[in-house]
Amino acid sequence: MPYHQEANPTGSLLVSALLALFPLLVLLSLLGVFRWKAHWAGVATFGVSLLIAVGVYGMPPLMAVNAGLYGAAQSVLIILWLTFNAIWIYNMTVHSGHFAVLRRAFSSIGDDIRIQAIVIAFSFGALLEALAGGGSPVAICAVMLIALGVRPLKAATLTLIANTAPVAFGGMGNPITVLGEVTGLPAEDFGAMAGRQVSLLAVVVPFVLLFVADGRRGLRQAWPGALVGGVSFAVAQFLTSELVYQLADIIAAIVSAAALLLLLRFWRPAGEPVTAAAISGGGGAVEESGPERNSRSEVLRAFAPYVIIILVFSLVRVDALRAPLETIGTTFAWPGLDIVSSTGATVDTDYAFAFGSATGTLLLISGLLSLPFLRVSPREGVLVWGRTVRQFGWAILAILSVFALSYVMNFSGQITTLGTWLADTAPFFAFLSPIVGWFGVAITGTDAGANALFGKLQTTAAERIGADPVLLGAANSSGGVMAKMISPQNLAVGTAAVGLVGQEGVLFRRIFGWSLLLLLAVCTLVFLQSTPVLGWMVP
Protein backbone atom coordinates (compact mmCIF):
# COMPACT_ATOMS: atom_id res chain seq x y z
CA MET A 1 0.00 0.00 0.00
CA PRO A 2 1.33 3.47 -0.85
CA TYR A 3 1.93 5.96 1.92
CA HIS A 4 -0.21 9.11 1.61
CA GLN A 5 1.34 12.28 2.97
CA GLU A 6 -0.75 14.52 5.21
CA ALA A 7 -0.03 18.23 5.36
CA ASN A 8 -1.95 18.57 8.64
CA PRO A 9 -1.88 15.24 10.51
CA THR A 10 -2.95 16.65 13.92
CA GLY A 11 -5.93 18.67 12.70
CA SER A 12 -4.27 21.91 13.83
CA LEU A 13 -1.91 23.34 11.25
CA LEU A 14 0.01 25.29 13.92
CA VAL A 15 0.57 22.18 16.05
CA SER A 16 1.54 20.13 12.99
CA ALA A 17 3.99 22.82 11.91
CA LEU A 18 5.62 23.01 15.35
CA LEU A 19 6.07 19.24 15.37
CA ALA A 20 7.47 19.31 11.83
CA LEU A 21 9.85 22.08 12.84
CA PHE A 22 11.04 20.23 15.94
CA PRO A 23 13.79 18.14 14.25
CA LEU A 24 15.37 21.25 12.75
CA LEU A 25 15.23 23.06 16.11
CA VAL A 26 16.83 20.05 17.77
CA LEU A 27 19.61 20.00 15.18
CA LEU A 28 20.37 23.71 15.52
CA SER A 29 20.25 23.50 19.33
CA LEU A 30 22.58 20.50 19.52
CA LEU A 31 25.08 22.27 17.28
CA GLY A 32 24.81 25.82 18.59
CA VAL A 33 23.78 25.48 22.25
CA PHE A 34 24.95 22.08 23.46
CA ARG A 35 28.04 22.05 21.18
CA TRP A 36 27.58 18.51 19.98
CA LYS A 37 29.75 17.28 17.17
CA ALA A 38 27.97 17.32 13.82
CA HIS A 39 27.89 13.55 13.36
CA TRP A 40 26.25 12.89 16.74
CA ALA A 41 23.87 15.82 16.29
CA GLY A 42 22.93 14.47 12.86
CA VAL A 43 22.33 10.93 14.12
CA ALA A 44 20.26 12.14 17.10
CA THR A 45 18.14 14.44 14.95
CA PHE A 46 17.62 11.66 12.40
CA GLY A 47 16.15 9.62 15.26
CA VAL A 48 13.85 12.51 16.21
CA SER A 49 12.63 12.85 12.62
CA LEU A 50 11.87 9.11 12.52
CA LEU A 51 9.79 9.37 15.72
CA ILE A 52 7.74 12.25 14.33
CA ALA A 53 7.35 10.61 10.91
CA VAL A 54 6.02 7.40 12.50
CA GLY A 55 4.24 8.74 15.59
CA VAL A 56 2.68 11.91 14.17
CA TYR A 57 2.45 11.38 10.41
CA GLY A 58 1.69 7.65 10.50
CA MET A 59 4.50 6.65 8.15
CA PRO A 60 5.25 2.92 8.37
CA PRO A 61 8.43 2.44 10.46
CA LEU A 62 10.30 0.41 7.86
CA MET A 63 9.41 2.92 5.15
CA ALA A 64 10.63 5.79 7.34
CA VAL A 65 13.98 4.06 7.86
CA ASN A 66 14.09 3.26 4.15
CA ALA A 67 13.53 6.95 3.35
CA GLY A 68 16.58 7.72 5.48
CA LEU A 69 18.66 5.13 3.61
CA TYR A 70 17.54 6.71 0.34
CA GLY A 71 18.64 10.12 1.56
CA ALA A 72 22.00 8.82 2.74
CA ALA A 73 22.52 7.20 -0.67
CA GLN A 74 21.74 10.52 -2.35
CA SER A 75 24.59 12.19 -0.45
CA VAL A 76 27.22 9.80 -1.79
CA LEU A 77 27.48 11.43 -5.23
CA ILE A 78 26.11 14.87 -4.39
CA ILE A 79 28.43 15.64 -1.46
CA LEU A 80 30.92 12.92 -0.51
CA TRP A 81 32.25 12.03 -3.97
CA LEU A 82 32.49 15.73 -4.86
CA THR A 83 34.26 16.79 -1.69
CA PHE A 84 36.70 13.87 -1.63
CA ASN A 85 37.96 14.80 -5.08
CA ALA A 86 38.01 18.56 -4.44
CA ILE A 87 40.20 18.11 -1.35
CA TRP A 88 42.27 15.45 -3.13
CA ILE A 89 43.30 18.02 -5.75
CA TYR A 90 44.40 20.40 -3.02
CA ASN A 91 46.23 17.66 -1.11
CA MET A 92 48.20 16.83 -4.24
CA THR A 93 49.44 20.43 -4.39
CA VAL A 94 50.68 19.95 -0.82
CA HIS A 95 52.25 16.59 -1.63
CA SER A 96 54.01 17.98 -4.70
CA GLY A 97 55.34 21.06 -2.90
CA HIS A 98 53.16 23.52 -4.87
CA PHE A 99 51.33 24.56 -1.71
CA ALA A 100 54.03 27.14 -0.94
CA VAL A 101 54.06 28.25 -4.58
CA LEU A 102 50.33 28.95 -4.40
CA ARG A 103 50.76 30.93 -1.21
CA ARG A 104 53.46 33.16 -2.68
CA ALA A 105 51.47 33.60 -5.90
CA PHE A 106 48.38 34.77 -4.05
CA SER A 107 50.55 37.01 -1.91
CA SER A 108 51.47 38.83 -5.11
CA ILE A 109 47.88 40.12 -5.27
CA GLY A 110 48.95 42.43 -2.48
CA ASP A 111 50.37 42.30 1.00
CA ASP A 112 47.01 42.68 2.71
CA ILE A 113 45.30 39.40 3.63
CA ARG A 114 41.89 41.10 3.86
CA ILE A 115 41.87 41.95 0.15
CA GLN A 116 43.28 38.52 -0.66
CA ALA A 117 40.35 36.99 1.24
CA ILE A 118 37.85 38.91 -0.92
CA VAL A 119 39.58 37.85 -4.14
CA ILE A 120 39.83 34.19 -3.12
CA ALA A 121 36.73 33.50 -1.00
CA PHE A 122 34.33 35.85 -2.81
CA SER A 123 35.45 36.21 -6.44
CA PHE A 124 37.27 32.93 -7.07
CA GLY A 125 34.78 31.09 -4.86
CA ALA A 126 31.93 32.41 -7.01
CA LEU A 127 33.64 31.05 -10.11
CA LEU A 128 33.92 27.61 -8.51
CA GLU A 129 30.28 27.81 -7.39
CA ALA A 130 29.24 28.64 -10.93
CA LEU A 131 31.13 25.71 -12.42
CA ALA A 132 31.06 22.99 -9.80
CA GLY A 133 28.68 24.00 -7.01
CA GLY A 134 28.20 21.66 -4.09
CA GLY A 135 30.85 22.06 -1.42
CA SER A 136 33.74 22.69 -3.79
CA PRO A 137 34.07 26.49 -3.22
CA VAL A 138 34.19 26.00 0.55
CA ALA A 139 36.64 23.11 0.32
CA ILE A 140 39.03 24.69 -2.18
CA CYS A 141 38.95 28.33 -1.08
CA ALA A 142 39.34 27.49 2.61
CA VAL A 143 42.55 25.60 2.01
CA MET A 144 43.79 28.40 -0.27
CA LEU A 145 43.35 30.85 2.61
CA ILE A 146 45.19 28.45 4.89
CA ALA A 147 47.96 28.43 2.30
CA LEU A 148 48.24 32.18 2.87
CA GLY A 149 48.53 31.64 6.61
CA VAL A 150 44.94 32.16 7.80
CA ARG A 151 44.05 29.92 10.71
CA PRO A 152 41.76 27.01 9.75
CA LEU A 153 38.64 28.07 11.68
CA LYS A 154 38.75 31.62 10.34
CA ALA A 155 39.41 30.34 6.82
CA ALA A 156 36.32 28.11 6.99
CA THR A 157 34.25 30.98 8.43
CA LEU A 158 35.24 33.39 5.64
CA THR A 159 34.58 30.91 2.83
CA LEU A 160 31.19 29.84 4.18
CA ILE A 161 30.03 33.46 4.48
CA ALA A 162 31.37 34.30 1.01
CA ASN A 163 29.49 31.34 -0.48
CA THR A 164 26.13 33.15 -0.41
CA ALA A 165 25.39 35.59 -3.24
CA PRO A 166 26.67 33.21 -5.98
CA VAL A 167 24.61 30.20 -4.80
CA ALA A 168 21.34 31.15 -6.50
CA PHE A 169 23.09 30.84 -9.89
CA GLY A 170 25.49 28.06 -8.89
CA GLY A 171 26.14 25.03 -11.06
CA MET A 172 25.51 27.03 -14.24
CA GLY A 173 22.18 28.31 -12.90
CA ASN A 174 20.90 24.89 -11.83
CA PRO A 175 18.73 26.19 -8.91
CA ILE A 176 16.92 28.57 -11.28
CA THR A 177 16.51 25.84 -13.89
CA VAL A 178 14.98 23.54 -11.27
CA LEU A 179 12.64 26.34 -10.19
CA GLY A 180 11.37 26.67 -13.73
CA GLU A 181 10.89 22.92 -14.07
CA VAL A 182 8.87 22.42 -10.87
CA THR A 183 6.66 25.50 -11.34
CA GLY A 184 6.09 25.39 -15.10
CA LEU A 185 6.99 29.09 -15.36
CA PRO A 186 9.86 30.47 -17.49
CA ALA A 187 13.20 29.96 -15.77
CA GLU A 188 14.44 33.15 -17.45
CA ASP A 189 11.90 35.18 -15.46
CA PHE A 190 13.05 33.61 -12.19
CA GLY A 191 16.66 34.27 -13.15
CA ALA A 192 15.99 37.95 -13.80
CA MET A 193 14.07 38.31 -10.53
CA ALA A 194 16.70 36.49 -8.47
CA GLY A 195 19.32 38.77 -10.01
CA ARG A 196 17.40 41.76 -8.67
CA GLN A 197 17.59 40.29 -5.18
CA VAL A 198 20.94 38.55 -4.65
CA SER A 199 22.92 41.15 -6.59
CA LEU A 200 22.05 43.68 -3.87
CA LEU A 201 23.24 41.16 -1.32
CA ALA A 202 26.52 40.82 -3.22
CA VAL A 203 27.35 44.44 -2.42
CA VAL A 204 27.15 43.68 1.31
CA VAL A 205 29.03 40.36 1.52
CA PRO A 206 32.59 41.73 0.98
CA PHE A 207 32.03 44.21 3.81
CA VAL A 208 30.94 41.32 6.05
CA LEU A 209 34.14 39.49 5.10
CA LEU A 210 36.22 42.52 6.07
CA PHE A 211 34.49 42.75 9.43
CA VAL A 212 34.86 39.04 10.16
CA ALA A 213 38.51 39.15 9.11
CA ASP A 214 39.58 42.29 10.96
CA GLY A 215 36.66 43.95 12.73
CA ARG A 216 36.12 47.70 12.53
CA ARG A 217 39.72 48.30 11.54
CA GLY A 218 39.16 46.18 8.44
CA LEU A 219 36.11 48.24 7.45
CA ARG A 220 37.86 51.52 8.14
CA GLN A 221 41.06 50.73 6.24
CA ALA A 222 39.98 48.43 3.40
CA TRP A 223 36.41 49.51 2.54
CA PRO A 224 37.30 50.66 -1.01
CA GLY A 225 38.34 47.08 -1.85
CA ALA A 226 35.06 45.71 -0.53
CA LEU A 227 33.10 48.39 -2.38
CA VAL A 228 34.78 47.76 -5.74
CA GLY A 229 34.63 43.97 -5.37
CA GLY A 230 30.99 43.94 -4.29
CA VAL A 231 29.59 46.57 -6.66
CA SER A 232 31.39 45.20 -9.72
CA PHE A 233 30.16 41.70 -8.89
CA ALA A 234 26.60 42.94 -8.29
CA VAL A 235 26.38 44.95 -11.53
CA ALA A 236 27.77 42.09 -13.61
CA GLN A 237 25.50 39.52 -11.94
CA PHE A 238 22.44 41.76 -12.33
CA LEU A 239 23.04 42.47 -16.02
CA THR A 240 23.93 38.88 -16.93
CA SER A 241 20.93 37.44 -15.06
CA GLU A 242 18.72 39.55 -17.32
CA LEU A 243 20.26 38.01 -20.45
CA VAL A 244 21.68 34.52 -19.72
CA TYR A 245 21.20 33.56 -16.09
CA GLN A 246 23.37 30.43 -16.50
CA LEU A 247 26.44 32.66 -16.92
CA ALA A 248 25.61 35.18 -14.17
CA ASP A 249 28.18 33.95 -11.64
CA ILE A 250 30.94 33.29 -14.16
CA ILE A 251 30.79 36.81 -15.57
CA ALA A 252 30.36 38.38 -12.13
CA ALA A 253 33.33 36.47 -10.68
CA ILE A 254 35.66 37.44 -13.52
CA VAL A 255 34.56 41.08 -13.51
CA SER A 256 34.90 41.33 -9.72
CA ALA A 257 38.40 39.82 -9.66
CA ALA A 258 39.53 42.01 -12.57
CA ALA A 259 38.12 45.15 -10.92
CA LEU A 260 39.95 44.38 -7.67
CA LEU A 261 43.25 43.71 -9.43
CA LEU A 262 42.86 46.97 -11.35
CA LEU A 263 42.10 48.85 -8.12
CA LEU A 264 45.24 47.48 -6.49
CA ARG A 265 47.33 49.18 -9.16
CA PHE A 266 46.30 52.57 -7.75
CA TRP A 267 45.26 51.90 -4.14
CA ARG A 268 46.35 50.02 -1.03
CA PRO A 269 44.52 49.73 2.32
CA ALA A 270 45.40 52.49 4.77
CA GLY A 271 48.08 51.78 7.35
CA GLU A 272 50.50 48.88 7.40
CA PRO A 273 49.50 45.75 5.43
CA VAL A 274 47.56 43.34 7.65
CA THR A 275 49.02 39.84 7.62
CA ALA A 276 47.32 36.50 8.09
CA ALA A 277 48.94 36.19 11.50
CA ALA A 278 47.37 39.50 12.56
CA ILE A 279 43.78 38.52 11.70
CA SER A 280 44.25 34.98 13.04
CA GLY A 281 45.29 36.12 16.48
CA GLY A 282 48.96 35.37 15.96
CA GLY A 283 50.70 32.27 14.78
CA GLY A 284 48.61 31.97 11.64
CA ALA A 285 51.41 32.33 9.15
CA VAL A 286 52.95 29.36 7.42
CA GLU A 287 56.67 28.91 7.34
CA GLU A 288 58.31 29.82 4.07
CA SER A 289 59.81 26.95 2.12
CA GLY A 290 61.82 27.09 -1.04
CA PRO A 291 62.92 30.26 -2.82
CA GLU A 292 61.34 33.63 -2.19
CA ARG A 293 60.21 33.87 -5.80
CA ASN A 294 59.21 30.96 -7.99
CA SER A 295 59.71 30.71 -11.72
CA ARG A 296 56.76 31.43 -13.98
CA SER A 297 56.58 27.76 -14.96
CA GLU A 298 56.26 26.67 -11.31
CA VAL A 299 53.50 29.20 -10.71
CA LEU A 300 51.66 27.91 -13.78
CA ARG A 301 52.05 24.35 -12.51
CA ALA A 302 50.61 25.33 -9.12
CA PHE A 303 47.55 26.94 -10.71
CA ALA A 304 47.17 24.25 -13.39
CA PRO A 305 44.65 22.12 -11.41
CA TYR A 306 42.27 25.06 -11.01
CA VAL A 307 42.61 26.12 -14.65
CA ILE A 308 41.90 22.52 -15.63
CA ILE A 309 38.81 22.49 -13.38
CA ILE A 310 37.46 25.57 -15.14
CA LEU A 311 38.18 24.10 -18.58
CA VAL A 312 36.66 20.70 -17.78
CA PHE A 313 33.48 22.12 -16.32
CA SER A 314 33.14 24.58 -19.19
CA LEU A 315 33.67 21.93 -21.88
CA VAL A 316 31.11 19.50 -20.46
CA ARG A 317 28.44 22.15 -20.92
CA VAL A 318 28.72 21.34 -24.64
CA ASP A 319 26.06 18.76 -25.44
CA ALA A 320 28.35 16.67 -27.66
CA LEU A 321 30.84 16.25 -24.81
CA ARG A 322 28.32 15.90 -21.98
CA ALA A 323 26.15 13.26 -23.65
CA PRO A 324 28.68 10.38 -23.45
CA LEU A 325 29.29 11.08 -19.77
CA GLU A 326 25.56 11.03 -19.03
CA THR A 327 25.36 7.45 -20.31
CA ILE A 328 27.67 6.27 -17.49
CA GLY A 329 25.39 5.44 -14.61
CA THR A 330 21.95 4.09 -13.94
CA THR A 331 18.53 5.13 -12.67
CA PHE A 332 16.17 2.80 -10.84
CA ALA A 333 13.10 2.94 -8.64
CA TRP A 334 14.17 2.73 -5.02
CA PRO A 335 12.44 -0.36 -3.58
CA GLY A 336 9.91 0.05 -0.80
CA LEU A 337 9.17 3.74 -1.31
CA ASP A 338 5.68 4.14 -2.76
CA ILE A 339 4.56 7.62 -1.68
CA VAL A 340 1.67 9.87 -2.72
CA SER A 341 1.86 13.58 -1.86
CA SER A 342 -0.90 15.54 -0.13
CA THR A 343 -1.96 16.85 -3.56
CA GLY A 344 -2.41 13.33 -4.93
CA ALA A 345 0.72 13.30 -7.10
CA THR A 346 3.19 10.42 -6.96
CA VAL A 347 6.42 11.41 -5.23
CA ASP A 348 9.52 10.74 -7.32
CA THR A 349 11.62 8.14 -5.50
CA ASP A 350 13.85 7.10 -8.39
CA TYR A 351 17.54 6.91 -7.55
CA ALA A 352 19.76 8.39 -10.24
CA PHE A 353 23.35 7.17 -9.97
CA ALA A 354 24.65 9.58 -12.62
CA PHE A 355 28.30 8.73 -12.06
CA GLY A 356 29.66 9.96 -15.39
CA SER A 357 28.27 13.49 -15.22
CA ALA A 358 28.53 13.91 -11.43
CA THR A 359 30.46 16.95 -10.25
CA GLY A 360 32.77 14.71 -8.24
CA THR A 361 33.62 12.66 -11.32
CA LEU A 362 34.47 15.81 -13.26
CA LEU A 363 36.73 16.86 -10.38
CA LEU A 364 38.34 13.42 -10.47
CA ILE A 365 39.01 13.85 -14.20
CA SER A 366 40.46 17.29 -13.48
CA GLY A 367 42.72 15.81 -10.83
CA LEU A 368 43.96 13.06 -13.11
CA LEU A 369 44.73 15.61 -15.81
CA SER A 370 46.62 17.64 -13.21
CA LEU A 371 48.99 14.81 -12.26
CA PRO A 372 51.66 15.52 -14.90
CA PHE A 373 51.57 19.27 -14.23
CA LEU A 374 52.12 18.71 -10.50
CA ARG A 375 54.70 16.01 -11.24
CA VAL A 376 52.74 13.46 -9.19
CA SER A 377 52.86 9.83 -10.31
CA PRO A 378 49.62 7.79 -10.60
CA ARG A 379 50.69 5.66 -7.63
CA GLU A 380 51.29 8.75 -5.51
CA GLY A 381 47.93 10.14 -6.62
CA VAL A 382 46.15 6.99 -5.41
CA LEU A 383 47.93 7.12 -2.05
CA VAL A 384 47.03 10.78 -1.59
CA TRP A 385 43.38 10.01 -2.47
CA GLY A 386 43.29 7.32 0.22
CA ARG A 387 44.70 9.73 2.82
CA THR A 388 42.11 12.29 1.75
CA VAL A 389 39.20 9.94 2.45
CA ARG A 390 40.65 9.06 5.87
CA GLN A 391 40.97 12.80 6.57
CA PHE A 392 37.18 13.15 6.62
CA GLY A 393 36.60 10.58 9.36
CA TRP A 394 33.42 11.34 11.30
CA ALA A 395 32.40 14.04 8.81
CA ILE A 396 31.22 11.24 6.52
CA LEU A 397 28.71 10.11 9.15
CA ALA A 398 27.56 13.72 9.64
CA ILE A 399 26.80 14.14 5.95
CA LEU A 400 25.06 10.77 5.64
CA SER A 401 22.88 11.35 8.72
CA VAL A 402 21.76 14.85 7.75
CA PHE A 403 20.80 13.74 4.25
CA ALA A 404 18.89 10.85 5.83
CA LEU A 405 17.13 13.35 8.09
CA SER A 406 16.18 15.64 5.20
CA TYR A 407 14.57 12.86 3.19
CA VAL A 408 12.62 11.49 6.15
CA MET A 409 11.24 14.99 6.70
CA ASN A 410 10.50 15.36 3.00
CA PHE A 411 8.92 11.97 2.32
CA SER A 412 6.87 11.86 5.54
CA GLY A 413 5.29 15.25 4.76
CA GLN A 414 6.98 17.36 7.44
CA ILE A 415 8.46 19.71 4.83
CA THR A 416 5.04 20.16 3.19
CA THR A 417 3.52 21.02 6.56
CA LEU A 418 6.08 23.76 7.19
CA GLY A 419 5.56 25.27 3.76
CA THR A 420 1.77 25.13 4.02
CA TRP A 421 1.81 26.78 7.43
CA LEU A 422 4.01 29.64 6.30
CA ALA A 423 1.97 30.08 3.11
CA ASP A 424 -1.16 30.46 5.24
CA THR A 425 0.00 33.85 6.55
CA ALA A 426 -1.68 35.69 3.63
CA PRO A 427 -0.17 39.10 2.69
CA PHE A 428 2.62 38.79 5.27
CA PHE A 429 3.82 35.72 3.39
CA ALA A 430 5.87 37.95 1.10
CA PHE A 431 8.09 38.69 4.10
CA LEU A 432 8.21 35.04 5.20
CA SER A 433 8.69 33.62 1.70
CA PRO A 434 12.53 33.68 1.83
CA ILE A 435 12.37 31.85 5.18
CA VAL A 436 10.74 28.90 3.42
CA GLY A 437 13.75 28.66 1.12
CA TRP A 438 16.06 29.14 4.12
CA PHE A 439 14.51 26.11 5.84
CA GLY A 440 14.81 24.13 2.61
CA VAL A 441 18.53 24.76 2.22
CA ALA A 442 19.19 24.27 5.95
CA ILE A 443 17.72 20.79 5.60
CA THR A 444 18.85 19.73 2.11
CA GLY A 445 22.12 21.68 1.90
CA THR A 446 21.42 22.83 -1.67
CA ASP A 447 19.49 25.72 -3.19
CA ALA A 448 18.35 23.48 -6.04
CA GLY A 449 16.99 21.01 -3.47
CA ALA A 450 15.09 23.76 -1.68
CA ASN A 451 13.60 24.95 -4.98
CA ALA A 452 12.55 21.41 -5.84
CA LEU A 453 10.85 21.08 -2.44
CA PHE A 454 9.18 24.47 -2.12
CA GLY A 455 9.18 26.14 -5.55
CA LYS A 456 5.68 25.04 -6.50
CA LEU A 457 4.37 25.84 -3.03
CA GLN A 458 5.72 29.39 -3.32
CA THR A 459 4.07 30.12 -6.67
CA THR A 460 0.80 28.50 -5.59
CA ALA A 461 0.73 30.58 -2.41
CA ALA A 462 1.50 33.70 -4.45
CA GLU A 463 -1.50 33.12 -6.69
CA ARG A 464 -3.70 32.50 -3.64
CA ILE A 465 -2.77 35.80 -1.97
CA GLY A 466 -2.62 37.83 -5.19
CA ALA A 467 1.17 38.24 -5.28
CA ASP A 468 3.49 37.79 -8.25
CA PRO A 469 4.50 34.10 -8.49
CA VAL A 470 7.83 35.00 -10.11
CA LEU A 471 8.69 37.24 -7.15
CA LEU A 472 7.99 34.61 -4.49
CA GLY A 473 9.49 31.78 -6.50
CA ALA A 474 12.75 33.71 -6.82
CA ALA A 475 12.51 34.63 -3.13
CA ASN A 476 12.67 30.92 -2.30
CA SER A 477 16.03 30.71 -4.04
CA SER A 478 17.37 34.04 -2.72
CA GLY A 479 16.38 33.31 0.87
CA GLY A 480 17.74 29.80 0.62
CA VAL A 481 21.29 30.91 -0.06
CA MET A 482 21.46 32.45 3.43
CA ALA A 483 21.20 28.96 4.92
CA LYS A 484 23.97 27.54 2.77
CA MET A 485 26.58 28.63 5.31
CA ILE A 486 24.86 26.90 8.26
CA SER A 487 23.59 23.69 6.64
CA PRO A 488 25.18 20.75 8.48
CA GLN A 489 26.45 19.25 5.21
CA ASN A 490 28.45 22.36 4.39
CA LEU A 491 29.65 22.73 7.97
CA ALA A 492 30.94 19.17 7.75
CA VAL A 493 32.62 19.89 4.41
CA GLY A 494 34.21 23.06 5.80
CA THR A 495 35.61 21.45 8.94
CA ALA A 496 36.84 18.40 7.04
CA ALA A 497 38.56 20.60 4.45
CA VAL A 498 40.53 22.52 7.08
CA GLY A 499 41.24 19.54 9.33
CA LEU A 500 38.85 20.44 12.16
CA VAL A 501 36.35 17.57 12.08
CA GLY A 502 34.27 17.75 15.26
CA GLN A 503 34.37 21.56 15.47
CA GLU A 504 31.15 22.06 13.49
CA GLY A 505 29.35 23.52 16.51
CA VAL A 506 32.05 26.16 17.00
CA LEU A 507 31.88 27.10 13.32
CA PHE A 508 28.07 27.16 13.45
CA ARG A 509 28.04 29.67 16.30
CA ARG A 510 30.44 31.94 14.42
CA ILE A 511 28.23 32.26 11.35
CA PHE A 512 24.64 31.67 12.51
CA GLY A 513 24.10 35.33 13.37
CA TRP A 514 25.30 36.41 9.93
CA SER A 515 22.93 33.94 8.32
CA LEU A 516 19.95 35.40 10.20
CA LEU A 517 21.02 39.00 9.59
CA LEU A 518 21.37 38.50 5.84
CA LEU A 519 18.11 36.53 5.75
CA LEU A 520 16.33 39.45 7.43
CA ALA A 521 17.71 41.76 4.74
CA VAL A 522 16.36 39.49 1.99
CA CYS A 523 12.96 39.19 3.72
CA THR A 524 12.67 42.96 3.93
CA LEU A 525 13.70 43.39 0.29
CA VAL A 526 11.18 40.82 -0.96
CA PHE A 527 8.40 42.35 1.14
CA LEU A 528 9.12 45.81 -0.31
CA GLN A 529 9.22 44.31 -3.81
CA SER A 530 5.70 43.00 -3.18
CA THR A 531 4.52 46.56 -2.46
CA PRO A 532 4.46 49.72 -4.58
CA VAL A 533 7.67 50.84 -2.84
CA LEU A 534 9.90 48.46 -4.84
CA GLY A 535 7.28 46.78 -7.00
CA TRP A 536 8.90 48.33 -10.07
CA MET A 537 11.77 45.86 -9.63
CA VAL A 538 9.58 42.86 -10.51
CA PRO A 539 9.99 41.99 -14.23
Image (cartoon, helix red, strand yellow):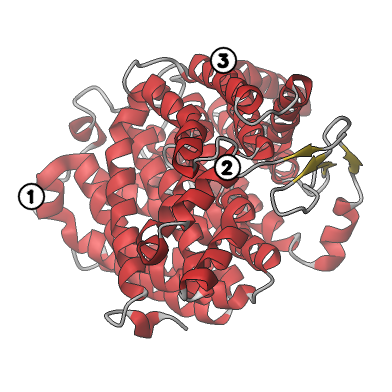
Residue under the point 62% across and 61% down: 456
Residue under the point 49% across and 59% down: 476
Above-or-below relation of 433 to 216:
below
Residue under the point 76% across and 53% down: 344
Q: CA distance from mark 2 to mark 1?
A: 60 Å
Nearer to us of marks 1 and 3 is: 3
SS state under label 1 = loop
Q: Is residue 100 left or right of residue 278?
A: right
Above-or-below relation of 462 to 109:
below
Give the mark nearest the N terminus, 2 or 3: 2
- Nearest the viewer among 361 and 423 is 423
The residue singled out by tag 2 in the image is 8
- Nearest the viewer among 279 and 481 is 481
Nearer to us of marks 2 and 1 is: 2
Q: Residues within 10 Å of mark 1 (few under 14, many from 20)?
A: few
The residue singled out by tag 3 in the image is 394
At which x and y percent is residue 117? 33, 47
Q: Is residue 155 left or right of residue 438?
A: left
Kind of residue at badge 1 = Gly
At which x and y percent is residue 392? 58, 20
Q: Is residue 247 visible?
A: yes
Nearer to us of marks 2 and 3 is: 2
Q: CA distance from mark 1 to mark 3?
A: 43 Å
Circles 2 and 3: CB atoms closer than 8 Å:
no
Kind of residue at badge 2 = Asn
Q: Is residue 269 visible?
A: no
The residue singled out by tag 1 in the image is 271
Above-or-below relation of 101 to 125:
above
At which x and y percent is residue 388? 62, 22
